[in-house]
Image (cartoon, rainbow, N blue to C red):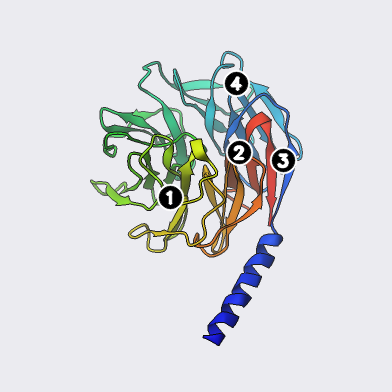
């Protein structure tokens, strides 16, 4: 028993020292946009997207940004962005009309590659397995989640023929573009909330979806799983209740066996979290309106490292740059 207490004390000290070393530094703010989309290409290049038709790109690790309000789309809410270079990016506008725009010249021109004026269409998230193959998730229509697919880098989009079923009152959240994740082998993961909190998983070479119930707050329209992050067979999900964002119970869970079984966190993040991102090893970063949290043990134990409000945190596809975004055009960097 004494040995156990000594080991526990050492572990807690190590955790505290590790958390203390984490730092979030504000890069800029003051733009009339609420950032919910970030795509970090590498340690230099990243794009952000937000409300009121705003997008921006950096080529120097976030030190400076080239902003634009896209002409003709001043009312669009660009809740997700997928970037492939400093020249090429796709942005997603959630509401009516539901839109997918693409640029290949660093935003000098944008082409509408998907437009739907049906008010039932509301787009939640976008993710790609590579530069060509990607998916967009939307709210359920007639008890089926909307799922769009592209195989040509976002130039054309088609309804995916095998979308998962949604129960009554179940949906996904367009909070950070991370309720949908697509792995490099084209396995699709979708997390949900509302009256149900589930993970829907599909390997695109199979014919059916697998659904796992997860221990995340649910039962109300503002409750559920908001974001999933994946590292091989290890997965972390965060969420909660965005209308009561300081409620800390059942806001995070994790799996160590590719989503087959899920465990609640032992120590939860400090309130509702809208996004979680894998950093390295067993380290994950999450953020939301009550602040930013970190775990260094795969999602079991969380500690708050910042109290500023952010919607999203994303790491470079090829590199270590980690950026956060929020309201008023706020962009910050997470330094390891």
* Viewer-side label of 1, 4: 4
Would residue 61 be seen by someone viewing this image from the given angle? yes
Q: Which mark is residue 62?
A: 3
- Residue drawn 67% across and 31% down? 329
Q: What secondary structure is found at the residue carrying circle 2? A: loop
CA gap, disc 3 and disc 2: 15 Å
Farthest residue, direction right? 63
What is the crowding at mark 4: few (fewer than 14 residues within 10 Å), some, or many (at least 20)?
some
Give x and y (percent) for residue 224. 41, 43
Q: What secondary structure is found at the residue carrying circle 4? A: loop
- Residue on which disc 4 sits: 52
Farthest residue, direction top? 72
- Is residue 320 toward the left or the right of residue 125 in the image? right
- Residue on which disc 1 sits: 183
Farthest residue, direction left? 207
Give x and y (percent) for residue 63. 76, 40
* Viewer-side label of 2, 4: 4
Front one among 32 and 56:
32
Does the CB distance between marks 1 and 4 fall below 8 Å? no
Give x and y (percent) for residue 203. 32, 49
N-term-proximal mark, 3 vs 1: 3
N-term-proximal mark, 1 vs 2: 2
CA gap, disc 1 and disc 2: 19 Å
Q: Picture quarter containing residue 284?
A: bottom right
CA gap, disc 2 and disc 4: 23 Å
Does the CB distance between marks 2 and 4 fall below 8 Å? no
Would residue 228 be seen by someone viewing this image from the given angle? no
């Amino acid at each position: 028993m004494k040995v156990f207490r000594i080991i526990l004390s050492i572990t807690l000290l190590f955790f505290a020292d590790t958390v203390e070393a984490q730092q979030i530094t504000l890069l800029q703010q003051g733009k009339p946009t609420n950032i919910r989309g970030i795509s970090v290409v590498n340690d230099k290049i990243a794009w952000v997207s937000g409300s009121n038709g705003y997008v921006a790109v950096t080529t120097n690790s976030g030190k400076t940004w080239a902003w634009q309000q896209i002409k003709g789309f001043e009312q669009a809410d660009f809740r997700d962005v997928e970037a492939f270079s400093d020249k090429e990016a796709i942005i997603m506008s959630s509401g009516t009309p539901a839109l997918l725009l693409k640029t290949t010249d660093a935003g000098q021109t944008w082409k509408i590659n998907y437009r739907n004026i049906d008010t039932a269409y509301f787009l939640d998230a976008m993710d790609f397995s590579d530069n060509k193959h990607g998916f967009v998730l939307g709210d359920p229509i007639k008890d089926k989640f909307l799922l769009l697919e592209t195989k040509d880098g976002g130039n054309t989009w088609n309804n995916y023929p095998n979308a998962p079923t949604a129960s009554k009152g179940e949906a996904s959240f367009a909070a950070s573009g991370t309720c949908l994740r697509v792995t490099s082998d084209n396995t699709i993961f979708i997390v949900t909330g509302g009256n149900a909190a589930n993970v829907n998983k599909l390997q695109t070479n199979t014919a059916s979806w697998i659904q796992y119930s997860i221990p995340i707050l649910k039962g109300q329209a503002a409750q559920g799983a908001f974001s999933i992050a994946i590292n091989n067979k290890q997965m972390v999900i965060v969420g909660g209740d965005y209308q009561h964002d300081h409620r800390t119970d059942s806001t995070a869970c994790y799996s160590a066996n590719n989503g087959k079984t899920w465990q609640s966190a032992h120590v939860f993040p400090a309130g509702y979290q809208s996004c979680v991102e894998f950093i390295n090893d067993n380290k994950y970063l999450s953020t939301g309106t009550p602040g930013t949290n970190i775990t260094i043990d795969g999602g079991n134990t969380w500690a708050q490292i910042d109290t500023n409000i952010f919607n999203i945190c994303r790491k470079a596809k090829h590199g270590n740059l980690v950026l956060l975004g929020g309201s008023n055009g706020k962009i910050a960097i997470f330094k390891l």
